[in-house]
Structure formats: structure tokens, C-alpha cells
Image (tube, grey):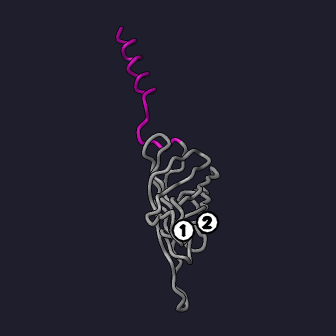
Amino acid sequence: MRRTALLAATLALVSGPVLAQDLIGVEGYYMGHGEGELTAEITHIENDRYVISINTLVPMENDIPGCGGGIDGEVLLESSGGNFFAENEFYDPEGDTPSSQARYCEIGLSFDGKGELQIEERDGCISYHGAACGFTGTLFHDAAGI
């Protein structure tokens, strides 16, 4: 009887949900380049929900102004990637500038399974960074190649 109870308890623990585990292996810190330096940090919340923070920086050079910006929020991801959307705070359907006409900033994320992350800024993100930089580029997981 005790063996049955012990076996049942062991099976319940082994088959129960694993909390805060990144099941698709994309969580972590990424660094790379696009129009400037790019970083992304991805933190697993639960299931396929993650928090992402993306930052871009083009330093000032020879009296030419630099550029920088960042965006963060929740995203649904699978092992191949996903699409990140953030509401554009300057959205105005009747606005006369490109940054006011897009309702969302959209960024495509693509993972290669070997520590590489491709980020593609698709639309409406200029209000999150300056005109001289963007969120498009190739980044590598800080543990890639180890």
C-alpha cells in the first residue's frame, strides 16, 4: 500500500506543471547590430507568454547626432519566433505624419534555434526611437557558442 502511495505521489510530482520554465529555449539576453547597437532581453512569464525589451543606440559621431530608443511589453512566442505589437501612443487616424498614422509598432522576431535572433521592424515604431536608428538587425544570445 505504501509503495502505491509513494508511486502515485512521485508520478503526480513528475507529471505536474513546470512553473517559470522556458520551454522553447529563447529566454535570455541578446546583443547585436542593425543601424546601430541592438539589445533584447526576453523573460518567460508562462506558457508561450514572454516579456521583451528591445533597445537601439547609434552613438554620436563627428558632430552628427546619434539616436536611441527602446520598447518593451508582452509577446507570444514559439520556437520559430513571433510578432511583437505595442500601441503607438501618438496614434491619430487622421494624423498627417507616418508616426501618427500607425496604430501599432510591429516587430517581427525570428529564432534560428542556435542562439541567433533576427528582429525586423515592420511598421509604426519611429515614436519609440529617433529617425536615424531602428529595431531591425541580427542579435546573438549571450550564451551562444558556449
Is there any visible trace of residue 81 in the rendered image? yes
Residue at 60% from the left image edge and 66% from the top image edge: 136
Residue 45 lies, with reference to residue 17, above or below; the image says below
| Residue 66 percent across, percent down from the top left | 51, 82
Q: In this figure, which residue is indicated by the disc labeled 1?
A: 38
Badge 1 amino acid: Leu
Rendering coords of residue 105 (x, y %) = 52, 61
Mark 1, secondary structure of its residue? strand
Mark 2 touches mark 1? (CB < 8 Å): yes
Would you name the residue on which mark 2 appears? Answer: 137
Q: Which amino acid does label 2 sit on?
A: Gly
Return the x and y of residue 41 as percentages of the image width and height. Answer: 47, 58
Magenta residues (range): 1-23
Residue 145 seen in the figure = no
Q: Which of 85 and 90 is in front in this view?
A: 90
Question: Where residue 56 sits: x, y (%)?
Answer: 51, 70
19 vs 11, nearest the viewer: 19
Q: In which quarter of the image is the N terminus?
A: top left
| Residue ID at (54%, 62%) | 102
Q: Residue at x 45, y 47 (%)?
A: 44
Observer-nearest of 131 and 20? 131
As drawn, 87 above or below 5 = below
Residue 117 on the magenta span: no
Q: Quadrant of residue 10?
A: top left
The first of marks 2 and 1 along the sequence is 1
**Secondary structure of the residue carrying numbered label 2:** strand
What residue is rendered at 42% in x and 46% in y? 45
